[in-house]
Amino acid sequence: MAAEPATEPSLDEIVALCKRRGFVFQTSEIYGGLGSTYDYGHYGVLLRMNVKDEWWRSMLRDRDDVVAIDSAILQHPRTWEASGHLEGFTDPLVQCLGKCKRRWREDHVRSEQLGAEDAQGEIVCPNCGGELSPPRQFNLMFKTHMGPVEDSGTEVFLRPETAQGIFVNFKNVLGFARKKPPFGIAQIGKSFRNEITPGNFVFRMREFEQMEMEFFVPPPEAERWHEHWMEQRMGWYTDLGIRPDHLRLREHGAEELSHYSSATSDVEYLFPMGWSELEGIANRGDFDLTQHARFSSEKLEYFDQATGDRYVPYVIEPAAGVDRAMLAFMVDAYDVEEVEGRKRTVLRLHPRLAPNKAAVLPLVSKEGMPERAREVFGDVRAKMPAEFDEGGSIGKRYRRQDEIGTPWCITIDGDTLADGTVTLRDRDSLEQTRVAAEEIADLLADRLDQAWTSPKLA
Ligand code: ATP
């Protein structure tokens, strides 16, 4: 069994690891950074790739009722009129009238200073204690212009969610996908929000990536499918190693619901800054298709030839964030323990998520070990993502792999040359075993296979 992480890291510890090991960098760092945008380094790219791949696997490849789409970031501006974003995708903005003049999201300040229930009491600037202005609604969509003329007629928006690109393609998909409700359309892509008070690292960014699926159902089945997707999505996180007591479903109160939703539950994770949204699972009813039908004059409905029924499907939407998911997986996997009097930091990532599954390490860079190690590396790399590392002391190299979350290290040493065995080191138990070099690739491929069915490392 994999050891359960015992550590509850601070966000600063996660940020430090991300920087130290090249998961995440601040955008434009050499120019002083740009507010709440981040770049992903090599291991961040690989980890996010695996998060997205696991999402595609559970949403698409393991089912036969969901199809994929990849819609443009720039859409016809009418999209955002119809969806209600132009009018209603706003947050209440307050500005400090005291010393610091900083801007804040009123609802966040209110719940921090007065608790979520108190809508009336007085709030002050969280930074300098100054008086705050009355709130005004601030639209979160980024604007730009299409073509060489910059006037209101050429204004377009960077999408604030990927969902609308799915709704406007409903008719196209219905035309070719050979699907009828209940069926879903899934998409992963960048979204942009001009957040008022970003922060908390990659939890709240202005440019981020979403994984959204719109599941179209006959209206009487909506509630049942909402339940189904809540269960599925909770299971996805726990199957990939999130501790169940760090995950919860929270139903939105009536005052919290978005303009389109009749019921929403958030999957929340116990981040270092407290319980926060990881994913929203909403019953959007027929709001979006009805609105786009009205604005475009297209018929966006389903006609069942067998029964003669014609109806606008309801939509159940699990909407997750790649960046928040990655952060949650890292926080949950982060562990610090003492081994033989020394501190060891380890990311106990599920092997399916780990950026690399194995690392091949020649003990020393001589006596033919690198050459033999390259041969083993060739075998292993043919079966799974792996890396080769021959620089520095073996202890340092192990520590590096631990912090990247590599489940297995293979060391080539003097015995390998003598008897053809290698050392296999397990990230979690630290157990070291000797295995025949010819068998190591198959053995690890088997272990990885087991991890596909069993959430815990064998
Ligand atoms: P919040 O209340 O935290 O602002 P939201 O309810 O507006 O989030 P949704 O519109 O439901 O978020 O978006 C779906 C998912 O997209 C979120 O659960 C989150 O994982 C991700 N997401 C939304 N905004 C951001 C952001 N600014 N940075 C990173 N991820 C985000």
Image (cartoon, rainbow, N blue to C red):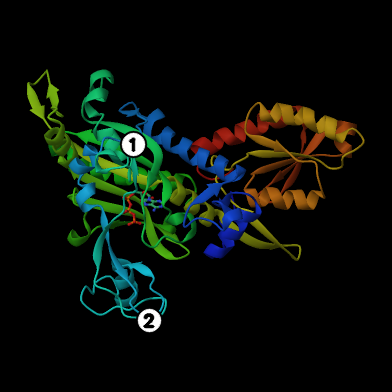
276 relative to 106 in the view: left or right: right
Question: At x 48% / y 45%, what residue is drawn?
Answer: 240
**Residue tagged 2:** 129
Q: Position of residue 134 (x, y in %)?
A: 24, 72
Q: Quick one: label 1, few (<14), some, or many (20+) residues within 10 Å?
A: some
* Vertical position of residue 173 compared to residue 145: above or below: above
Tell me the kind of residue under disc 1.
Met
| Residue 111 disc label | none
**Residue tagged 1:** 146
Judged from this view, the residue extending furthest toward the front is 149
Q: Position of residue 10 (x, y in %)?
A: 54, 65
99 relative to 342 in the view: left or right: left
Question: At x 23% / y 79%, what residue is drawn?
Answer: 121
Q: Nearer the viewer, residue 217 or 273?
A: 273
Query: What is the CA distance from the residue labelled 1 to the residue labelled 2?
Result: 42 Å
Secondary structure beneath disc 1? loop
Tell me the kind of residue under disc 2.
Gly
Q: Nearer the viewer, residue 272 or 173?
A: 173
Q: Position of residue 221 (x, y in %)?
A: 17, 38
